[in-house]
Image: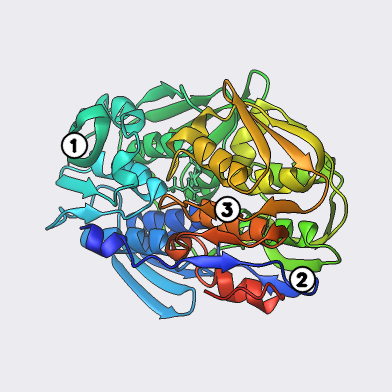
Amino acid sequence: MDTVHAPSPRPLNVHAPAAPLSGAVTVPGDKSISHRALMFAALARGETHISGLLEGEDVLRTADAMRALGATVVRTGPGAWHVTGRGIGQLQEPADVLDMGNSGTAARLLSGILASHGIFSVMTGDASLRGRPMKRVTDPLAATGATFLSRAGGRLPLAIRGVADPAPLTYRLPVASAQVKSAVLLAGLNAAGTTRVEEPVATRDHTENMLRHFGAHVTVEPLGAGGRTITLAGRPDLVARDVVVPGDPSSAAFVLVAALVVPGSAVTVRGVGLNPLRTGLFTTLREMGADLRLSNERIEGGEPVGDLTAIAGPLHGVDVPADRAPSMIDEYPVLAVAAAHAAGPSRFRGLEELRVKESDRLAATVALLERNGVAVQVVGDDMIVTGTGGAVPGGGVVETRMDHRLAMSATVLGLTASAPVGVDDTAFIDTSFPGFIALMNGIGAGLAP
Ligand SMILES: O=C(O)C1=C[C@@H](OP(=O)(O)O)[C@@H](O)[C@H](O)C1
Ligand SMILES: C=C(OP(=O)(O)O)C(=O)O
């Protein structure tokens, strides 16, 4: 199995470029929105046309899974996909194991769909995904009547005996996770009655937005300070709708941070998704003194989008509150790289969720910085980075641990290191940002394997 998902390692040795980075680029489509577009289109009646779909490994696994469940999924051009759905409750039993590769989003969201169909299925993934917790979704989903069998600790492979008439759930999220919220809501699509999810801290709301777009009745009400209660009326008539996927702000992050830290640089990323529940990094970078300019703001496919220009300049340390974490949860490794260049200490609070990503990102980010001469410590669930106020020493080899975001963060670190930075494997970058190295070279990074 891992022969499929453990591609040959692609090591990279990163040197600081001779000249500043410059240019205007677009990054691939948003990963969260791309997974959802394929899944919801497969559950809708009729043919959905998706443009700007991320063609990264994670999303391709979702496309394969929806095909295995009986939807027709066809690529008609770069980023252009047509999906003919089967309707809620109408997905067919897959004939084989569903392999979700490296993707937590694919596995967790799909578990909600599989649990709420009267079919048997088995999901697995690569060594990284097989190490990630699934009880966070199977515990609430068990109350629908579905049954689950898994390895110890609720790890994949996971066998699911779904139910055709799932009970509607009311669930308060014990962790701030859009994946868990989405799994519960997706199970609620085939439940007779109202599904209710309470999230004490708001997480990305692409599921709510896109379900509405396809015709579901979803309400969102405030809950306490910063939380939300989401309700979904079961068994809606989901109808095919076109989806336009914006550029992924989590991918734009690497390009923009690189431009901020390579002296003299100015780079624009066009068409970046700016959903306020995804933009914590941009807020934080501005607090650090970054010159980050927004232009051409518009609404595209129901999501706010704009062009972001990053202009290099001095950064200073910052204290990031824990309640901002969900709006930038995937951006901490590259934020740590920005903090390594900033003058003075930065503290990032409440990072416990980083321990259960594609790797233990808290430990891996510490190792990335320490190996390259940057002082960093973990206190409880907080990370404290002591910035140099300029270039970092470098000279280390970074272990990327099957984690795309570590590979890209290490690459960005190398662009301003005094000694070259080794990256043991860049192959996993393809899960979320195919073409990353070519795109970086297009703005002058000069990366050569
Ligand atoms: O719902 C989503 O699309 C995602 C939610 C986040 O995970 P959690 O729900 O585990 O926080 C994020 O880290 C992941 O990259 C994508
Ligand atoms: C955590 C991530 O994704 P997933 O959970 O889908 O594997 C990510 O892309 O950083």
- N-terminal of the pair, mark 3 or mark 1, is 1
Q: Quadrant of the N terminus?
A: bottom left
Residue drawn 77% across the image and 54% down it: 391
Nearest to N terminus: mark 3 or mark 2: 2
Does residue 96 appear anywhere in the picture?
yes
Q: Is residue 70 visible?
A: no
Task: Give the residue type at disc 2.
Answer: Leu
> With respect to residue 329, does 102 lie above or below?
below
Q: Using the numbered discs, state the Cα–Cα distance from disc 3 to disc 1 in whole angstroms.
A: 51 Å
420 vs 181: above or below? below
Cβ of mark 2 under 8 Å from ligand 2: the answer is no
- Dot 1 falls on a residue whose secondary structure is loop
Question: In the depicted view, which residue is nearer to us: 92 or 414?
Answer: 414
| Of pointers 1 and 2, the one earlier in the residue sequence | 2
Residue beneath disc 1: 163
State left or right for residue 40 relative to residue 333: left
* Mark 1 vs mark 2, CA separation in Å: 54 Å
Amino acid residing under circle 1: Val
- On residue 396, the disc is 3
Identify the residue at horizontal 35%, vertical 38% (top origin).
132
Identify which residue is drawn at 62% across, 56% down. Answer: 395
Q: Which residue is mark 2?
A: 21
Q: SS class of the residue under badge 2?
A: loop
- Answer yes or no: do the residues labelled 3 and 1 have beta carbons within 8 Å? no
349 or 304: nearer the viewer: 349
Location of residue 111 by image quarter: top left
Q: Amino acid at mark 3?
A: Gly
Tally the marks.
Answer: 3
